[in-house]
Amino acid sequence: MSNAQQQVATGASLPEPWRSMILEKALPGESPLSWLETDLDDHLRYHSGVLVLTQQRIFSRKPGFKDWEIINLTSDMTLKRKDHAGAGVLELMDSQGRISFWRYTIGHSPAVRYFIERFNHREQPPVEEKTFTCPTCGSEMAEGALECSKCADKPVAPASSALFRLIQFAKPRSMAIFIGFAMTLTGTAAGLIPPYLTMPIMDEVLIPHQNGQPVDEKLVTFFLLGLLGSSLLAWLMTWVRTYIMAWVSERIGSDLRNAAYSHLQKLSLEYFGGKRTGDLISRIGTDTDQICTFLSLHLLDFVTDVLMIAMTVTILLSINPWLTLIAFIPLPVIAWLLHLVRERLRRGFKEGMRAWGEMTTVLADTIPGIRVVKAFAQENREVERFGKANDHVLEVNDRTNFVWATFAPMVTFCTEVGLLIVWGFGIYWVAKDTITVGVLTAFITYIGRFYTRLDSMSRIASITQRAAAGAQRLFDILDRVPSVPEPLNPVQPGRVKGKITFDKVGFRYGNRMVTHDISMEIQPGEMVGLVGPSGSGKSTLVNLVCRFYDVSEGAIRVDGHDIRSFPVSEYRRNIGLVLQEPFLFYGTIAENIAYGRPDASRAEVVAAARAARAHDFILRLPEGYDSLVGERGQSLSGGERQRISIARALLIDPQILILDEATSSVDTETEREIQEALDNLIQGRTTIAIAHRLSTLTKADRLVVLENGSIVEEGKHEDLLALDGTYARLYHAQERASMQETVSQND
């Protein structure tokens, strides 16, 4: 809602200058109770108007008028609203009929509801705003809200714990991880041996030789073999642990992708309605790859650095505790710098991943829709759109890189300063004969490695935050609770008989009540046609029967059982669905027909194609049933795709058949062929059919007419025509349009 709408919905004071105008016309003791801003005129054009409610009257200034209309309220007056196809109308009624009305866009619905509540209780204090429970987090959300503010504002998985939650995916490979850790520990220890051997080489071989003593060849050979052996052991251990950790990380990444994709399949259509395809692809693909890289390479380096630092500190303390403490002088500064940039890096990487997802979305939109792009000559526009998305990626990454470019050199500078301090104190103590040259040489070698590892650990901070951001985005998917949940105590549906009962069914999408108080019963084997103007709720009822969404009010029962008590997959195996827009997957025609039954024989596939009147055109293709249809079936016509879609639904032999505008994409001749097939196929099946052309539903056992989300008429074709109501109006309008089209073609 806009700020103005929010103010209305919460009962905020009437703003100036309207308040002054109303108070000038007010009666003694009369004051504004509520106000409502409308944005459509009587011809559905955008125009601002206002309604003001007091205890005794309604002040109305309609769009396009400067004067106020004042309506005195009586006890028999009521306010009613109707929402339809993105617009609504608020009507003031009395016992004689409608007194006045005002139009608004659907976004004003919450404010309209509050205005009606104040009208109904204008003699009482303001009513509290209605609240609903968020299905994801369980917190209260306003009636008009499309999404829970807590779920929208806060990530489901905190970044601080996202990486630690990867442990659940690492547990199945715990033995391999343990072996890799042992190799890391051994290799790190072996890598610390060479500097330690430099002390006796300096103090027992080189310095005595400078003082005129002969070189002990056996001692030199021993030290050199020690250096060689430690180097070989460190190399071997590093090779083994690198391979093992890469093996583990790839499998963790694979498990992450499988888990995320599997969970996506369990989420309802409501979740996908608010997400962009490219962003979801980016999360499962790119973000998972970032995590794999972190686990296989950088996490291993981080563990090695930690072990190296711990062991190095132990050796340094054993060599000279005072020099060790001096070497730690830069550590507080480095820790402060790391704390300063860590959150900025994580936020920057998350924004970068989101920008990358937006760029991927452009690809996901334009590549499948390339025919539309070229048909409307919008290639340059799409190139520009992709360029803007790509520039946004650059902009976000540049900001993050600036933070990192500032931080990394500062850490290096601090370590260089620390090394200079150690050199200064070391030279001073050598001059005072407090330590030997060999001790200082070994200490400088170790402290150099210490600072190198410290610098490496600080650089890993950026990679860690990138992986944490990716893990957070993945767990945002995995932590989503399906709004169409599996039942706690499931009832196995088996093969249903097909009796469908709607018991006061209502469905709310965001702030819009799509259907309400739908009650009817469909007998097994009965064909029911759903008709009505666009936006009346026909497709919504079909989606509720399929349980793509769950009802907001009431219940839908099949064979006497609430469909919410059935396991979702088991229940949907009883339903054959043909959508208005047929969707085919990349593959052969036979694979698409057998999508619901991958184990179906070729004979069964052909039988389904024959029944759907698709067999003849399939045989005319170069490879028949083995012909590739291309992505989304672009190589076929709309009618051909629709017939394959019908064959796909028929192959599973459903007990409930749902046809959502099943013949809308075919020509008249093809429609006649499909209709002949459907006449035979609906026998013995409960069928719910929606059709744009009402003439295709004349053979239905019963027609149910919907308008504004409610059932307004019900009966057979002839009976509804005789009523001369909504159905008759729609039917005759289509007849006139068909006659005009025929005349135009003849001319």
Image: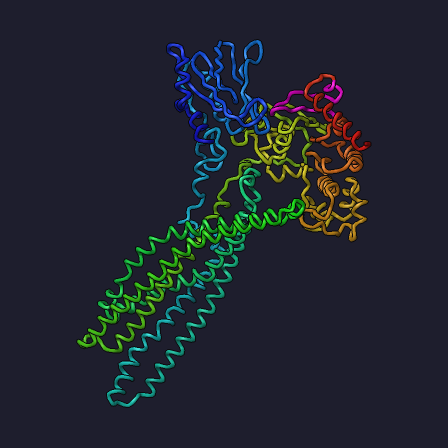
Q: Is residue 658 visible from the viewing direction of this image?
A: no
Instruction: In this rendered view, identify the residue nearer to me: 90 or 65.
Output: 65
The percent coordinates of residue 478 (x first, y second) are 50, 45
Quadrant occupied by the C terminus? top right
Q: Is residue 4 visible from the viewing direction of this image?
A: yes
Instruction: In this rendered view, identify the residue nearer to me: 380 or 625.
Output: 380
The percent coordinates of residue 331 (x first, y second) are 29, 60
Is 219 positioned to the left or the right of 496 in the image? left
Establish if 119 lies above or below 479: above
Q: Residue at x 35, y 83 (%)?
A: 222
Establish if 538 lies above or below 93: below
How many numbered markers are drawn? 0
Is 534 positioned to the left or the right of 66 in the image? right
The percent coordinates of residue 714 (x first, y second) are 68, 21
User: Is 483 in the magenta?
Assistant: no
Residues in magenta, as a range:
700-721
